Image: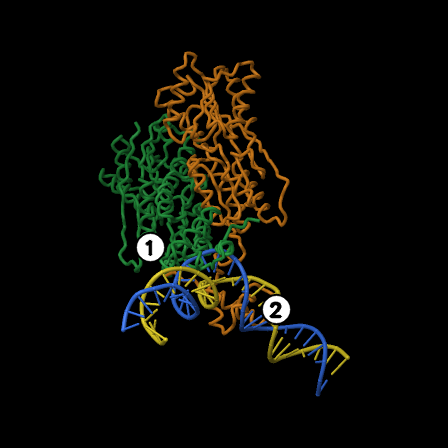
Chain colours: A orange, B green, C blue, D yellow
Amino acid sequence: MFEPTTLKDIAKALGLSTSTVSRALRDTHEISSETKKIVLAYAEKINYKPNPIALSLKERRTKSIGVLVSEVANHYFSQAIGGIEAIAYDRGYHVIITQTHESYEREKINIQHLASRGVDGLLVSLSAETSDTNHLSLLHDRGLPMVFFDRVAKDIETHKISANNEQGAYDATIQLLESGRRKIAHLTSSDHLSISIERLAGYTAALTKYGIPVQPEYIKHCPHGGMFQEETEQAIRELMSLTDKPDAIFVAGDRLSIGCLTVLKKFNISVPEEISISGFSNSDVLDLFKSPLSSVRQPAYEMGCMATEMLIKLIESKYPVTEFENRVLDTELVIRA
Amino acid sequence: MFEPTTLKDIAKALGLSTSTVSRALRDTHEISSETKKIVLAYAEKINYKPNPIALSLKERRTKSIGVLVSEVANHYFSQAIGGIEAIAYDRGYHVIITQTHESYEREKINIQHLASRGVDGLLVSLSAETSDTNHLSLLHDRGLPMVFFDRVAKDIETHKISANNEQGAYDATIQLLESGRRKIAHLTSSDHLSISIERLAGYTAALTKYGIPVQPEYIKHCPHGGMFQEETEQAIRELMSLTDKPDAIFVAGDRLSIGCLTVLKKFNISVPEEISISGFSNSDVLDLFKSPLSSVRQPAYEMGCMATEMLIKLIESKYPVTEFENRVLDTELVIRA
DNA sequence: TAAATTTGCGCAATCGTTCCCGACAACGTT
DNA sequence: AACGTTGTCGGGAACGATTGCGCAAATTTA
């Protein structure tokens, strides 16, 4: 059905051998400028493009990188993907995006698929369910370059890039404290994710600074990062049925923020009168809410760019890389009041 | 660095030829059950996976489909992609997502890239800038299967799937009329997109039903579908500087809806007191706005599923397909009041 | 003019896999 | 005993592109 032209077609049409045609296109010196001109003109005319699959087989690289995120319908990730694509395309790499929907099984399948399809490297942000990263270690040990961003694996030694989650969480919590709130709950993703751990640390540090004890019943983990709305609803329900109800919630993620607001609206709890909300989000719709809702914004686009730069450097490195960077970027507290 | 095992490795280890090993794994009859058992056991042990690139080269198919959307950070598209992935993975196809960001140039580059990477088929939703679909016709004529969804090309004969845009637009406009508004403007994407044309028709029909003349100055096209905020801002500014200001706007898209609300907030125009808004959107954050904001919701996930089913049927068809479907799905008017 | 060098191009191998063919046993049939 | 049949398996071509090697012709040098 769909048959692109090959070197052989050109060779036959011009009465040359495939090697000569290849050399003409590849611009080697072992070729007369005359034949080169003829071949180039003809190739241009029929719009010849070398078959990338044949090239991949020969050169054992695909010029493509695999991306693993929890979902693209998340402002942080869609912005990060923007940065990834920008750099990748510029360097001649193709980007294959896969979604885990926070599922460990899906993560394993996707990673396996990407690896077997022969991507040259991997940009990974772990799923909320993932606590065992053995499926990644295996590939990493066998030499597949990978770079983690946002949700990093602590026991795999490679480049990592993340936002200053602790500082961001600290800033957001301090802001709630400064606005007079004292009973601040924390709604977050699964407890083993790097971002959860760091954001919890920032939250704790802020409370401690104000001499407020950290209450375990104020901290609610959603094992699937709020992918299922019932999870978020259950967490909020438990918070609101405490005898000492919180008067603010620090929310640790994009999806959770929206989920949290949805549940509060459903429960007829007014924001920010009854409960003040602040949290990590890269969404711009927050601007539209009547009630002010401050947020911590991560430099998603930049993180995507940097991660991709690092990955391509790994891929194209002639020698095994043994020194790895762990870059941390500052967050920005967007105050809406 | 990263060297997976090959047929040759197995053959050498077992003292067999590659053909025999291949046959054992392929489960042909021309093989003794004994050798088959040995080979299968060994392949299992070392976790052998055939090289998909070599297979692609040989069989001239990649078991992957390319997707072209304007951007993943759009609730309609991210939901549609969910449907696409569900069907594709189930059938053993991989999905490669590319974004045009509503740019014609980017669309051409992405399509070219997907085609040259040898995807088996294409799922296409045109960019707002695209009026000339020659780059797609070329590939289609050469036999590359493609299915259009949402934003379809009218002069390419293949399967198409879209929402009942005219009915949806009609419903939304009628709802604004029923709530007492009479000066209803229309904010929409570029004028050549199929969805723009159909939604405009629905808007016109509703006004006509109420005996209201359609005023050209009430209809504002954003050539990039609101991808640039200035575009939306300019349109709203023009609408609000009319002597006969509109008291409602029917907005024709996801991004435009958010953009429109952002501009209105910036201009300190109250919604829905001064201006009532209704439009196409698959976003769930609309639920969170204090002011009710009805919307037309497209069955995005189902559309993604159906489009993928159709495409795979095209790809796997033994004979050239000449009869094409043009499926239209109903929209849902979500009333928030 | 003959030898030495350069130039231009084709042959064939390679990447990993499949598959058509041919080889060659071990049979059964005549 | 000669021949056909069947069951297994290996050899080698093919998919499309690149590239080292060798060979012939053209050019330069002695």
Disc 1 residue crowd, few under 14, some 14–19, many 20+, Cα 10 Å: few
Q: Is residue D25 above or below residue B265?
A: below
Vertical placement of residue A237 versus A141, above or below: above
> Label 2 near label 1: C-beta < 8 Å?
no
Q: Nearer the viewer, mark 1 or mark 2?
A: 1
Q: Which residue is mark 1?
A: B316
Label number found at residue A30: 2
User: Callout 1: residue from which chain?
Assistant: B
Picture coordinates of residue A130, whole percent (x, y): 47, 33
* Residue B100, image x, y percentages: 44, 47
User: Where's the N terminus of chain A, which quadrant?
Assistant: bottom left
Residue at screen point 56% across, 17% down: A208
Q: Is the residue marked by circle 2 packed among few (<14), some (14-19), or many (20+) residues within 10 Å?
A: few
Instruction: Please identify the quarter of the rendering in which residue B206 is found.
Output: top left
User: Measured along the vertical axis of the image, is residue B197 above or below residue A291?
Assistant: below
Amino acid type, residue under disc 1 in the picture: Glu
